[in-house]
């Protein structure tokens, strides 16, 4: 799983060479890829595959079992040698927003926001809690301080059995979704802010995320607290 997923070892890789291993109507599986498949709240990459004189658009990438399916506008034969090019502007924005999601998740723990039930690239959702506008303003201030501090993001691997997620429903749920045969978990640490296992793509240091343009608190359904953010 780790060797063929080039986005895990280098999330800044924009172009790569690969061979088509499986193909069908409007999809291919490659022997290696830098295209990020939709998961963990981070959307799928898009881009192109170049094959001889042909340019084929990749419009969606999904993980199915242990394979990564590239959905394409056209067909390519098994054995075809291709060059993949990721739509970098979209991916980099996703990386910045997803990294912001990590940072905000860590900072909201400091103000005791309570259990997080959902988050994506622009929203965090908490169970009913005493979270106030003052707390949100505090988090916004800390967030922008972390951007100025330009803290390097640390990525390393840990043994699944060493990880304790007891009591954290969302992490328990995420962990359960990772196949049992995956023993090495990818840990993503924003030192001093957040530590979580994650197979997504992240920026190298907090400075690249950029400052918040907005961070707003809203009352959600069933009295949940929703925080919307934008960079
Ligand atoms: Zn992540």
Image (cartoon, rainbow, N blue to C red):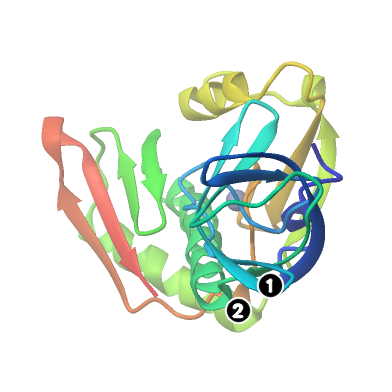
Left or right: residue 17 versus residue 179 is: right
How many labels, in total? 2
Residue 133: percent from the left, percent from the top?
22, 60
Closer to the camera, 151 or 13? 13
169 to 144, vertically: above or below: above
Q: Does residue 177 appear in this view?
A: yes
137 to 43, vertically: above or below: below
Closer to the camera, 229 or 113? 229
Residue extending farthest to the bottom is 148
Badge 2 local density, few (<14 within 10 Å), some, or many (20+)? some
Residue located at (68% from left, 20% from top): 179
Closer to the camera, 64 or 28? 28
Left or right: residue 24 versus residue 210 is: right
Badge 1 local density, few (<14 within 10 Å), some, or many (20+)? some
Q: Does residue 13 appear in this view?
A: no
Residues under numbered marks 1 and 2 in contact, where contact means CB atoms less than 8 Å apart: yes
Dividing the picture into quadrants, the one containing residue 161 is top right
Question: Which label is found at residue 159?
Answer: none
Closer to the camera, 227 or 84? 84
Residue 180: percent from the left, percent from the top?
73, 16
Label 1 sits on a secondary structure element that is loop
Residue 47: percent from the left, percent from the top?
56, 67
C-alpha separation, residue under disc 1 versus residue under disc 2: 6 Å
Residue located at (40% from left, 63% from top): 139
Residue 11: percent from the left, percent from the top?
71, 63
Image quarter where the N terminus lies is: top right
Q: Which residue is mark 1?
A: 205
Residue located at (40% from left, 33% from top): 115
Q: Which residue is mark 2?
A: 208
Residue located at (45% from left, 46% from top): 41
């Amino acid at each position: 799983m780790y060797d063929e997923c080039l986005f895990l070892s280098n999330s800044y890789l924009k172009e790569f060479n690969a061979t088509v291993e499986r193909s069908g109507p409007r999809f291919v599986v490659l022997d290696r890829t830098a295209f990020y498949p939709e998961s963990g709240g981070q959307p799928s990459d898009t881009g192109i595959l170049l094959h001889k004189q042909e340019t084929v658009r990749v419009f969606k990438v999904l993980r199915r079992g242990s394979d990564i399916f590239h959905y394409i506008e056209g067909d390519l034969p098994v054995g075809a040698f291709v060059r993949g090019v990721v739509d970098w502007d979209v991916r980099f924005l996703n990386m910045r927003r997803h990294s912001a999601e990590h940072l905000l998740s860590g900072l909201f723990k400091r103000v005791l926001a309570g259990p997080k039930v959902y988050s994506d690239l622009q929203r965090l959702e908490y169970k009913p809690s005493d979270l106030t506008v003052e707390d949100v303003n505090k988090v916004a201030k800390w967030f922008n301080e972390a951007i100025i501090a330009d803290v390097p993001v640390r990525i390393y691997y840990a043994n699944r059995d060493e990880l304790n997620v007891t009591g954290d429903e969302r992490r328990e749920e995420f962990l359960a979704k990772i196949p049992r045969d995956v023993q090495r978990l990818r840990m993503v640490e924003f030192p001093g802010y957040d530590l979580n296992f994650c197979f997504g793509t992240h920026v190298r240091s907090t400075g690249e995320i950029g400052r918040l343009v907005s961070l707003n608190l809203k009352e959600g359904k069933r009295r949940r607290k929703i925080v919307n953010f934008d960079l």
